Structure formats: C-alpha cells, structure tokens
C-alpha cells in the first residue's frame, strides 16, 4: 500500500499528455495518463496525431505545469525539438517537458539538451515515472 | 455580428490566470475576487447525464457562433476522484476542428471539491474570461443526474441534453434539472425512441402554467449527423436571448449569481476545514464537531490576509 504522500504526490497539478506526429499507438500514453491521475494529477489528453504547434497552444490555454509527449514513431528528435520551440514561442514559461516512448539510448543526451526533464521507456516501472515527474515539478516551485 | 475592434486573445496570460484562480483555496479566493466587467459575455450552460452528447453539441454551437464572428470560450468540467483527487479531462478531444480557430478558447476543469456539477472558483473563472472580451461562454457541466442545478445561477441560458432510452430519467428529472432548463435537446435522434422522449419532455413542459410573455422551453430533436438540427438548437438559443433582452431581470440574475458565489466559496472552505480536522474529531458528538467547524470558519473573519501575500497562493 502506498502511503498518503506518495498517493497525492501530484495533487492539484495539471499535466498535458500529448501524441505528436503520426504514430497511432496510444496505449502507453493512456497508461501514463491513468497513473498520473491516480497520483492526484489533473490530466488533459489531446488524442492522436497532433502537431507540435497545437500541443503548445493547448499547453498555454490549459495553463498546465507539465507536458508529456509520447512518441513511438522514431521521430522523437524532430517532434520534441519542434514542441519545445513552439512552447517557448507561445509563452509557456516554466512548463516542464517529459518524453515517453521508444527512445534509443544515444538520443537521451540530445533530448536532455532541449530541456526535457524526464525520459521514460516502457521498461520503467510506473511508480518511478510518477515519482520522477513529481520531483521535477516540486523543483519548479522552489 | 458586428463587433468592436478588440485586443487579440492572450492565451498564455489567460491560461496562467485561470490556473491561479482554480488553485486558490476558499480563503485566498475571497481576498482576490475577480470583478465582472461592465460588458459580460452571454453565457450558455450545457448540462445532462453522462454520454448524452453534451461535448459534441457544444462543438456544433461553438462552430456556429465562431462563424458569426463571435469570440467563444468554453469551460468543460469533469469530475475529480474523491480518493486520489486526480481527474482525466477529456472533453477537448470532442471539439474537432474548432480548437484551431483563432477566436476560440477551451479550458478543461476538474470539479475538485464542488459536488454541484460545476468546479471550485468557477464564478471567478468565468469573470476572468470575460475580461478577455469573449462574446459567448459555453459551460459544460459534469455529467449530471437530477439535482445538480447550480449552473442555473452562473449562466443566462441552460440547455439540457437528453437522449433516447432515458424515459425513466425524464420521470426522475421532473422536479429538478427539467425545471431550470430553457432549451431541451433530445440528442442521438437517429436512434429509436427519440420521438417518445421528446413527447414525454413536451408533456412535462406543456403541463406547466405559464404567465403571459413567459418563455416556453422548446424541445428539439438533434443528431450528430444532421447539421440542420444544430442550426435549430442555435436558433432556439438566439430566440431565448432575444426574449431575455426585453425582460429586465438583471437584478434578480445578479443576486442569484452573488448568492451562488458566496455559497460555493463557503462550501469549498468547509471542505478544506473538514479535511484539516483530525479524523478522531468525528468520534465526538455531532454538536461538538459542528461547534469546532463553525469556530474555525469564524476564525477566518479575524485572520487578516494581505492580498499580495496569500491571495492565489497554491493550496497544494
């Protein structure tokens, strides 16, 4: 049984889970969305095949604390870079970006250099993902 | 529609503002209330049981208003989990093409401590949106049953969405949400039984006694696949607003909003205070629990909170 602090680690946080690009596999995105909800977060899901520009618009419109991008198509380098750029252009200051999907080890450094705060693959236990997101968001407010 | 030149919609500023308001605790919100602007938006509430097609209807109404040159804002409320406090806010998915429109703004909200079909601090959220020159605000409630009537106080026009096979529901709704609605939409009219529901609602509405000049709510059959039916709903809403303009009930409307605003703030505050009480408190006699709660609530009167410091501080 999880203790109360872990259970509500994300209480009051707003998180956008988005699927940029063309891949049509959203099981992972939905599993993450439910795990974040169960940790207390308010999760907005965009649906499939959204453009980086649209995702940035939703992020500012919804006033989210974080954006989680799920990419399984292999285009994560371009899609994440584009989304980060559009977020900056849309005035989304302080919004944390996370990435999930099939991300080869050699791309981790590049994604981090774009400002991505957490990169999660299917091998990572859900509790660890939630804890990592919660920690990154807690750092933001201090 | 002729609209005066207005400033472009600042999505980032409004987005941040609404997050701050939504996160305000009952006390903080009281210290930084949002003043309603002189010219408010016309407000339309869309309510009804889960799965009746509220979001889809809202998309069609928003598209119609955008086509007329209006700036349209949507607030869609989904329920918060009573256990984790989390929520999945999924109404945006049904908005289709309109989400890309430059004069369209969509905000998802979790109900948080509200149990009335709306969300905490919604009264202030709507006023904050009105400061951004919206012509129309659409409010989608949580999927409701019979008793979630609060939307009546915050909007000008209540649209109740029903669907076929909800005959028992109509019976159950006779006293309640059926009484406060201005326009009835029987959605999914391509399914069997729609005409029956429309007739049942028509009976309920028709049996009421109306004074001369009173609004008689129309009952409209609608379907996702029938664009003309959405035009009929939009027309009924226009007719309602035309009727309302000649009616001069602004004072009553303002008072109802103020009463709801006060009630929702106090409700939220009591939920907070209840959560703060040690759980063993509830072993005490009810009178004692009540006394402690009221004492704590009264203490708010003496606590001076400089707005710059505590207002809209996160309650997490």
Image (cartoon, coloured by chain):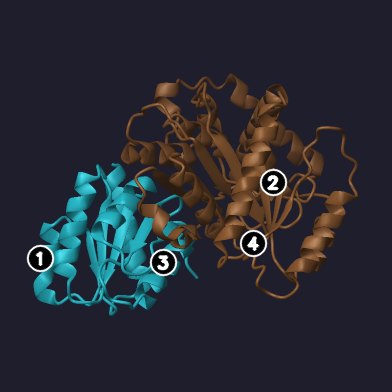
Q: Colour of chain A?
A: cyan
The mark lying in front, picked from 2 and 3, is 3
- List x then y, in percent, for residue B263: 68, 34
Q: Quadrant of the C terminus of chain B?
A: top left
Q: Secondary structure at mark 3?
A: helix
Q: Secondary structure at mark 2?
A: helix
Asked if marks 2 and 4 fall on the same chain, the answer is yes
| Res A33 label | 3
The residues bearing labels 1 and 4 have C-alpha atoms spaced at a distance of: 53 Å
The residues bearing labels 2 and 4 have C-alpha atoms spaced at a distance of: 52 Å
Q: Which chain is brown?
A: B
The residues bearing labels 4 and 3 have C-alpha atoms spaced at a distance of: 33 Å
The residues bearing labels 2 and 3 have C-alpha atoms spaced at a distance of: 36 Å
Q: Nearer the viewer, residue B21 or B2?
A: B2
The residue carrying mark 2 is B281
Q: Nearer the viewer, residue B232 or B40?
A: B232
The residues bearing labels 2 and 1 have C-alpha atoms spaced at a distance of: 53 Å
Q: Earlier in the sequence, mark 3 or mark 1?
A: 3
- List x then y, in percent, for residue B75: 51, 46
Look at the numbered discs 2 and 4 and tell me whether their residues touch, using CB distance below 8 Å.
no
The residue carrying mark 4 is B222
| Residue in the picture at 40% in, 23% down | B308
Look at the numbered discs 3 and 1 and tell me whether their residues touch, using CB distance below 8 Å.
no
Please state the chain letter of the residue tagged with numbered disc 4 in the rendered image: B
Please state the chain letter of the residue tagged with numbered disc 3 in the rendered image: A
Q: Secondary structure at mark 1?
A: helix
Q: Is residue B144 left or right of residue B67?
A: right
Please state the chain letter of the residue tagged with numbered disc 2 in the rendered image: B
Asked if marks 2 and 1 fall on the same chain, the answer is no
Q: For residue A22, say whether it is visible.
A: yes
The mark lying in front, picked from 2 and 4, is 4
The residue carrying mark 1 is A109
């Amino acid at each position: 049984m999880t203790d109360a602090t872990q259970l509500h680690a994300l209480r009051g946080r707003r998180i956008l889970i988005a699927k940029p690009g063309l891949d049509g596999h959203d099981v992972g995105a939905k599993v993450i969305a439910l795990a974040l909800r169960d940790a207390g977060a308010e999760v907005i899901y965009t649906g499939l095949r959204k453009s980086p520009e649209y995702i940035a618009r939703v992020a500012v419109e919804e006033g989210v604390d974080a954006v989680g991008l799920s990419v399984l198509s292999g285009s994560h380098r371009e899609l994440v870079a584009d989304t980060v750029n559009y977020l900056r252009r849309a005035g989304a200051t302080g919004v944390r970006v996370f990435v999930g999907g099939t991300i080869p080890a050699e791309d981790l450094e590049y994604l981090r250099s774009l400002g991505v705060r957490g990169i999660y693959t299917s091998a990572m236990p859900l509790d660890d993902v939630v804890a990592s997101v919660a920690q990154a968001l807690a750092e933001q407010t201090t | 529609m002729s609209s005066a030149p207005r400033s472009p919609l600042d999505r980032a500023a409004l987005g941040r503002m609404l997050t701050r308001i939504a996160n305000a605790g009952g006390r903080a919100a009281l210290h930084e209330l949002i003043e309603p602007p002189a010219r408010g938006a016309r407000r339309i509430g869309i309510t009804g049981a889960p799965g009746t097609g509220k979001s889809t209807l809202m998309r069609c109404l928003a598209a119609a208003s955008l086509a007329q040159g209006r700036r349209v804002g949507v607030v869609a409320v989904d329920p918060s989990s009573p256990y984790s406090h989390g929520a999945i806010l999924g109404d945006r998915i049904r908005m289709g093409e309109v989400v890309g429109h430059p004069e369209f703004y969509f905000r998802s909200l979790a109900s948080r401590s509200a149990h009335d079909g709306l969300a905490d601090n919604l009264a202030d959220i709507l006023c904050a949106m009105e400061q951004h020159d919206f012509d129309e605000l659409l409010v989608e409630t949580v999927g409701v049953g019979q008793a979630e009537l609060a939307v009546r106080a915050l909007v000008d026009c209540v649209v109740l969405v029903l669907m076929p096979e909800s005959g028992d529901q109509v019976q159950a709704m006779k006293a309640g949400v059926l009484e406060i609605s201005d326009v009835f939409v029987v959605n999914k009219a391509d399914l069997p039984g729609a005409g029956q529901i429309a007739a049942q609602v028509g009976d309920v509405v028709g049996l009421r006694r109306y004074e001369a000049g009173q609004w008689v709510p129309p009952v409209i059959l609608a379907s996702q696949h029938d664009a003309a039916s959405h035009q009929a709903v939009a027309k009924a809403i226009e007719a309602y607003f035309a009727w309302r303009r000649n009616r001069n009930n602004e004072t009553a409307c303002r008072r109802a909003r103020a009463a709801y605003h006060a009630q929702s703030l106090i409700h939220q505050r009591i939920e907070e205070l209840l959560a703060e009480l040690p759980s063993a408190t509830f072993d005490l006699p009810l009178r004692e629990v009540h006394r402690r709660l009221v004492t704590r609530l009264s203490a708010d009167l003496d606590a001076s909170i400089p707005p710059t410091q505590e207002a809209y501080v996160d309650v997490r």
